[in-house]
Image: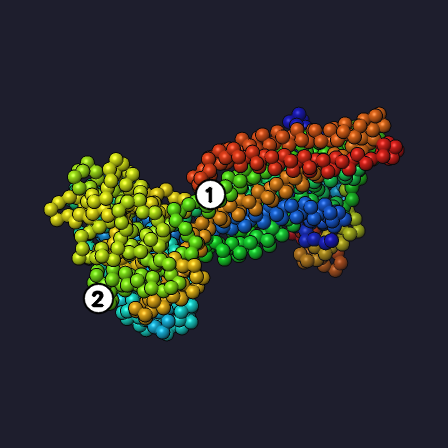
Amino acid sequence: MSRRLGLAALRVLQALDQGAEYGFDIIEATGLPSGTVYPALSRHEEDGYVRSSWEDLKTAHREHRPPRRYYRITPEGKRALAAALAELGLVRGGRSRTARAKA
Amino acid sequence: MTIVRVVIRAASWLVPSDWRDEWRREWLGEASAVAARGRSPIRFALGAPIHALALRWRDWRPASLVMDARFAARLLRRQPGFAVAAVGTLALGTAATIGIFSVVYGVLLKPLPYREPDGLVQIWEKNPLFGWTEAEVAPGNVISWRERNVVFSGIAWYLAGPDRHGGLADLTLGGDQPERVRGLHVSPNFFDILGVSARIGRTFLPGEDTPGRHRVVVLSDGFWRRRFGARPEIVGATVPLNGRPWTVIGVMPSGFVFDDRLTDLWIPAAGVADAREARQPHILRAIARLAPGATLSMAQENLSSIARDLEREHPETNRQMSVGIGPLDDWLVGRSRRPLLLFLAAVCLVLLIACANVANLLMARSAARGRELAVRAALGASRLRTMRQLLVESLVIAAAGTGIGLAIAATAVRLFVAYAPASLPRVNDIGLHPAISLFAIALTLVTTMLVGVVPAWQAGRAEPRAGVAEGGRSVSASGRLARLIVAVEVALAVVLLGSAAITLRSFRALVVADPGFEVNELTTAQIALPATPYSERAQVGAFYEELGARLRASPLVSAAGAAHGLPVKGSTWTGDLFIEGRPDVHARNLKHRSVTSGYLETLGLPLIAGRTIQTIDRLDQPLVVVINQTLARQFFADTNPVGTRIAFDPPSPKVRWRTIIGIVADEPQDGPGAPIAPLVYDSVSQEPMREMAVVVRSAAPSDQIIRLIRDAVRSMDPQLALAEPGPLTARIGEWLAPQQLAAALATVFAVIGLLLSLVGIYGVVAYAAATRTREVGIRVACGATRSDILRMLMVQHLRMASAGLGAGVLAAIVAADLAAWSLYGVPRHDVLGLAASSTVLFVSAVIACWLPARRALRIDPVAALRSG
């Protein structure tokens, strides 16, 4: 079921598309507060735009930090992102640009 | 970091339990990463509660509720027996509640259908000297209020009638078919004060109550349709009213009612505005509209100050005369408030019983669904999630029950409006208004909580492992809780039964109340003589005496006469009482009734002493009165009053003394069962009254006697019409209609309450018997006898039912106190009624326990043990 993406949700999806992987990473990439990013991630996951998995414990131990939950955009998420960007007029010649890049 | 951890851990409790651990791990992990990178972990952690709330909301948002509701509906379809029992029970309870609430809303809560009804007030006079608390007002006084007040934008008046009502004048509308119509005399600004305009034409103009200009009439919508076929051209035309031409100036909108829905038309109260100095008699009722910014207390203060001035200026008429004021809606419906609220309380009890039943059914069902609930819990469904699912199921049942209840109530309310007693005000406003739908929605939610919370709480406590391992049998509804619910049901049913018993006994006492004479074979009809051509006092008495004589001449008639007002419930005028030679006696509010010769004989009231009114007691003869037994007892305890002279004005050389010529047995004056007051019978020839009720005693059918009366009246004056002809028993039936309705409703509610509580007991015992099959098997195998098993299954439940019975009896005693004012001829604490109700309930409870317990005895112990 596709739904209309809000600007914050769009930026979270876009950040994932551009390589951000975990919560704080996405916060850094988007500049959005944690209270916006995490609800958007949960919603995207529920809609099937994003999938998440826990990092291997050994890797985390090796790097002396707690394990991370990694998020990945799904093909369906990519389609929704493209459609939303197209609707906003931000897609030219099949290439997407971020709002920031355009500015 | 400590604060950050506290915030995250606290917020995690908002997260649905199946995600909670992961959620906490992620947030705590990221928070430490944030801190490691030198950013503010506190700022980061502030998002945690927001995320937790978002997840919680996701669990409760409409889409998932709809899914739960669909699941609930599927479950109900799979268990039609359960669905019918639960939905049907709630439908009964909600139908009764919605029905009575519709009446309460229409009569008590809905704003009056006038412009800005909150600003409308009723004004009355009070006088401790005469014991007046809500007395009619005198024309001179109301005119003084109108001129001197600073708190009203206007004061209007109308002619007063019996009790708090307006006095509907009986008028004769002439034409080919003369018809008696009911009109209210009002001041010209009456409709302006109410803020209602005519639908066609206009209402009265200032000055149209001046004698000579006053022959204008405003019709009610119903009368206009019935009599004039809704012809608009009737406005401007003249109609013959009481033998004179009156101009129809307007028709009021449909639905416009003031005080009495039977009002056919309104006419100006001619001459009242000129009666500036008439500070008695008190014949008017006054309404007013508060000026902008004025309050009720300001108005009360202002009127009281005017009343004190009037007392100083007119000490002879206004001594201790003060003024009362209150909202108009309170005045019009105040008397109905208490009985209606009591009925609402009664149906709420019925609804509570219904809810208790369904709650028990749901508990039993969730126990039977133990395995399913345990599996849900094992799969990670939180306790809240399970409770929500069960509450949604309750909501579906409650919504279906309320929906069907609403449909039943719609029909019941239509029937109620058609057969409502005439004394119930604002009947036209009763119906299923939009507000009732809101009430139904609120009722659905309340019912959901009542039926759903306890079973959902019970089911929420399910231990997943135990439930799955033991095939779901461990998640059982608490038997103790179920029995407690049954005890509450029984208590509520006792209150309903006890109230119904006392109401029925009171009604029966009214029905069999001895009026002091034989009411069967009496036929009555009312006649009003117009001022033209009956302008002379002597003409009025002569007409009724002649009518009586003509009726008595018929071989069908054994006795006939006429009186001012109907027997048993006559409207009478009141005056003072002075007794010659006894200056110490000055009684007030002495009731009068003008009668023709033959009236007392027609009723068959026993003559205690002297003689009755006869044809010789004409205007030109010495004034005479007959007194009732109560008057004789109260004022002439030791002496024979026959021959004593009494007066209605203070003794003076000009006073007209009247000789007591006889004493008759008491005749009820205010309806069956009402207390009897001292009463004086005057001769209609000496105290003429234009409006009289003809009373005929005959063994012939009432219809035949009505024809006889109509022919006799027409033979004397073809322009006269009869009003309300019929047997006296029918009139008495109408007066008893409110009590009859009360008794009928109380009985219906009690029967529903009894049946529902019995079904409840049956259900709980049946469920207990079914779930204890294995235990019964073991006990039988160990040598328990049939009676041991019966005792085991019945005693626990009967003990709780008995506790409920005891609590119910106490509650019924309190309830009887609340309703004591409406009772007649039964002691306030009706021991007999309560004992009978308790016995009925207990015996029924024993049967309701015994039937399912007996079934448990048929259990084959071997099969029961094997199946366990």
Residue B496 position within the rendered picture, expressed as x and y whole percent measured from the top left: 55, 39
Residue displayed at 34% across by 72% down = B175
- Above or below, B738 relative to B585: below
Q: Quadrant of residue B523?
A: bottom left
Q: CA distance from mark 1 to mark 2?
A: 52 Å
Which disc, if any, is residue B509? Answer: 1
Q: Amino acid at mark 1?
A: Ala
Determine whether B430 is above or below B867 in the image.
Answer: below
How crowded is the residue under tag 2: few (<14 C-alpha within 10 Å), some, or many (20+)? few
Q: Is residue B757 left or right of residue B568?
A: right
What amino acid is found at the position of numbered circle 2 in the picture? Gly
Of marks 1 and 2, the one in the foreground:
1
Q: Is residue B761 left or right of residue A48?
A: left
Q: Nearer the viewer, residue B60 or B97?
A: B97
Q: Residue furthest left?
A: B653
Tell me the element at label 1.
helix
> Quadrant location of residue B127?
top left
Q: Which residue is mark 2?
A: B212
Q: Residue at x 46, y 47 (%)?
A: B511
Query: Residue drawn 55% across and 54% down?
Result: B412
